[in-house]
Image (spheres, grey):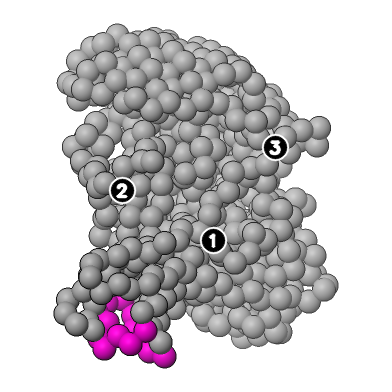
Amino acid sequence: MHQAKLTRPNATAQRADAGRMAWPGSALLLAAIVAVFAISCAPADAHPAAFAFQPITIQRINLPSSITGARWPGFAADNQHLLFFSSDELWITSLHGTDVHCLSCGAANDPEVPNSADFASPFPDGKRVLIEEDFQPGTSKMAVLDCQPSVDDCTRKQILPVNVSAAEPATIPPGGAVSTPQQTIFAGSYHAKLSPDGKYVAFSVFRSDAFEMMVVGKLERNGGEYVVADPRVINPPAPTSPFDRKVADWSDSSALTEFKAFTNGGADATYVEVGGPSIMSTQVWSVNLATGKRTQLTDNPDWNEDNGMSPDGRFLSLYSERTLHFIDWEGGLVPVRDFIDTPAAAMSAGAVGGLAGCEGPMWLLPPTGDDGGSLAGQPIVDYKYSVPRVVDNLAGASQWSPNGTMIALASSTDGTARVAPRYILLAHLTGLKSTRPLQPVSSQPGSWAPSPTDYHGAMGYAGSVTLRGPGAGTVTVNYAPIDGAFAGHWSETYTNYSANGRDFVNGTVTIDGTALAGTYSEHLKMTGADTGSDNTDLTFGPGVSGHASSTYDGHTITGPPSYAVRDAQGGPSSPCPRVHAPKLHIRTTRLRRGVYRVTVTASVAGVGPAETLVSTQPVDGATLTFGRRTTHTGSNGVATVHRLRSRWLRVSAGDTLVPSSVRLILSSPHTSR
């Protein structure tokens, strides 16, 4: 296979203000939306990045038969125990499946909600845990479990509710480009996580002008409860008036955003953004809480969302459907900045997000992300078994062990995290040494972050605005909300619009309906340095129907695929695609008689702007076996083999990379078969 580099200017420069199209949020978002409306209404190779695959072994921790299913596992602060949920109660187990017992059962103020996703964020003192139920009809369901003398020995316990009212004002006065009052649709501290120092909490709140408003506030004890004090909004900036012509402010504040995790000792926070720089694209971003500076971490055309940074800052664990073509067909591949995506993102979450049986695995990436989409990362898939499947884990940072060498995995026998087995899977990164977490810093947002009543998202605006493209042309956006972002009519028309002065977009996108159901139409054509077209007409709710076709730089994708059409039980009507464990690739070079240089790599296909490239990375710590002797590769995937007596060289690297072997012939270099 020939080598072809993915050049950075072409792949990423245009994405500074234009991106790919993909799909919004998860099935959890659908549950929240329902609650809201119940109350309210032979490819080429990409060049390797500075990232090496790791040997990973998968440990299965069996639990007692009294456990109906273990969901959303995460580590306790002591590095020796795991927290998990079963029947909407918080449980604890040792890393060997012993001393399993319920922590929240029987306590007053237990925020359990049936069939909800659950979050547990341990405090660093080892005595408390922040608990949140993600499906919250009517009022927020967040509380602090206080154990004495410790969480692992919870002899005396109490659960104290968390008062989040300061972050959820019932009415938001007009401001920015919004001329009418907006509202918090109903209380909802979604995806709540605790900062590394245990002093701040972050979550998302449903609002009519932003769909989800991301909040960071100080968590303080006040008598028999905790309160969220001085809440600050960390959403991207919104336009300051109807006459504001900042393209990014109109675009980013009309995207759907959702808080995900604190990172880098609490200095930064990650979130998912659907739309904004990339029309109908679901990407992970990071924001520095002190300065408000934002960094895009993923740029793969498919769904990228829940994530956690290792406590030492060495790795990012990411839930992603990359390489599966799960939702990239919805928006297409043609990159262009968007200004109205939130309603379609919500519709799509309900229509496609419920297909949890098609969920992909967690992926391992460097802390900087996927290198502008050119790096696939390492899928955490056990090559020996098709069952159990590793699926999405919403635990954020606590999915990582405090010493940075293990990842708690949500797993399933049928591909849905909601039908969990009576065991927990642990991924051991066996080549890593234990480390200390980064020193915690304050997660207090800087003065750039407004209060909830001072933030005004563009989706609350009613009217039309014409914006000039940074490179050329214009886009005219029409906002006709009936209920903010939750119902209305929206359109955007591009006329020779260019983000970079090289690529020009013409055409129209329209969205009509509610966050539960509606239509999405996109007909765009790009000319210039890159060429392509999107022709999409979809109807969402409760499933998806219609047709989508996208061509970009000569590569075409179409949809919906057959598995996206639901059967009578609401599941996929055909088998879902699967991510398979990559196979190790061996290249040998004879240096002199009996001495070889061995390079071990692994590859994942389906990356790059048009999903046509292959990401090839070295394998760090791979075990080379020749006869009775062994050696290991370095971080560059290279090892030197001396005094070779066996012609067969075998290579392995844990449970997530398929072993390989090669028969050495003395005359020339060779590759594995």
Residue drawn 28% across the image and 34% down it: 15
Q: Which residue is mark 2?
A: 1
Residue 223: name its quadrant: bottom right
Q: Earlier in the sequence, mark 3 or mark 1?
A: 1
| Residue 158 vertical position relative to residue 556 in the rendered view, above or below | below
Residue drawn 38% across the image and 70% down it: 662
402 and 668: which is toward the camera: 668
Say whether residue 633 is left or right of residue 235: left
- Residue 558 appears in the picture as rendered: yes
215 and 339: which is toward the camera: 339
Report if residue 199 lies within the magenta region. no
Query: Label 2 near label 1: C-beta < 8 Å?
Result: no
Secondary structure of residue under mark 3: loop
Q: Earlier in the sequence, mark 3 or mark 2?
A: 2
Residue 653 percent location from the top left of the image? 44, 72
Q: Which residue is mark 1?
A: 381
The amino acid marked with disc number 1 is Val
Secondary structure of residue under mark 1: loop
Classify 10 Å Cα crowding around label 3: few (below 14), some (14-19), many (20 and above). few
Classify 10 Å Cα crowding around label 2: few (below 14), some (14-19), many (20 and above). few
Tell me where the magenta segment starts and ends, as one range.
628-646
The amino acid marked with disc number 2 is Met
Residue 168 percent location from the top left of the image? 55, 41
